[in-house]
Structure formats: structure tokens, C-alpha cells
Image: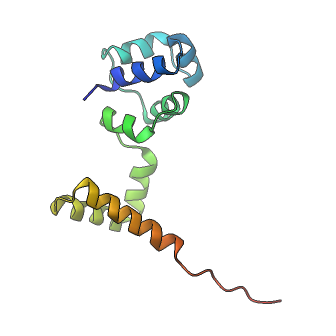
Amino acid sequence: MKSFGETLRELRTAQDLGLRETAGRVGISPAYLSRIERGKERPPRPEVIKALAKELAADPDVLFRLSSSTDPEVSGYLNEQPEVTNLVRFLKANDFSGEEIERLLDLAKGMKTDQPKPKRNKP
């Protein structure tokens, strides 16, 4: 598996973006971005990771996984909904495969879209 920095460099060059241009768009210095790409610097703050993902047309979750960081929105949701943490622990304890988790995700999506529409009161 490639490192965070190597992945960033590949994404940036695939988009035909220069180091200075990319750094400027996300509000960091070119030298800092260069150090990140070369593995001389730890992955940046979550806000910068999100901005890089957006500029490089990348999945932010992939970059978060490579950075060993967590998206603050996900962390916040886990704190607000302890049941979600229980679900994740259950999945881990029971060694769910990626395919099984995808099936659960499909079921969850179906639960949200199959709900009956609320009836409107007629005026």
C-alpha cells in the first residue's frame, strides 16, 4: 500500500497540477506540500486533507485512512450516536467481511428509501 504522500503526489500529477498550484489552492505552502509528498512531514490537519481531496478529485475517506486520521464529521457523529460505535464494535468482533458490510450498507439504504412518506394534513 502506498503512503499518504505518495498517493497525494500520484493524484496531483494525474490531474496535471503543479506543486505550487495545488498548495495555493488548498492554502498551504508549496514547501510544506513537497515535504508531505516526500514523507518528510506527517499528514496535515483534517481540514487540509479534505481540501486536498476536493482539489485532487479524490475520495477523502481514502486519504483519511492513509493518514491514520479520522474525518471530524465522522468522529462527531460517533460521539453523538453511541449506537453507531456499538455497531462498529459488533462488526469488528464478528469479523464481518467487506462483502457483508456492503450488504448491510445496501440494506440500510433500502430502509431509508423504503419508508412510507408522511401523510400531509389537508388544509
Q: Quadrant of residue 42?
A: top left
- Along the viewing direction, whichever of 89 and 10 lies nearer the viewer: 10
- Along the viewing direction, whichever of 77 and 94 lies nearer the viewer: 94
User: In this figure, which colouring scheme has been used for the structure?
Assistant: rainbow
Relative to 83, residue 6 above or below: above
Relative to 123, residue 12 above or below: above
Q: In this view, does 108 lie to the left or right of 86?
A: right
Relative to 44, residue 113 above or below: below
| Rendered residue at 40%/20% (across/down) | 10
Q: Position of residue 60 (x, y in %)?
A: 44, 38
Q: Where is residue 84 in the image (x, y as percent from the top left)?
A: 34, 64
Quadrant where the image shows the N terminus: top left
| Rendered residue at 54%/16% (across/down) | 17
Question: Which residue is outermost to the bottom?
Answer: 122
Q: How many marks?
A: 0
Q: Where is residue 28 in the image (x, y as percent from the top left)?
A: 51, 19
Q: Where is residue 116 in the image (x, y as percent from the top left)?
A: 57, 81
Q: In this view, does 112 lie to the left or right of 2?
A: right
Q: Is residue 14 left or right of residue 69?
A: right
| Rendered residue at 40%/27% (across/down) | 44
Q: Quadrant of residue 7?
A: top left
Relative to 45, residue 21 above or below: above
- Along the viewing direction, whichever of 40 and 4 lies nearer the viewer: 4
Quadrant where the image shows the C terminus: bottom right
Q: Is residue 39 left or right of residue 45?
A: left
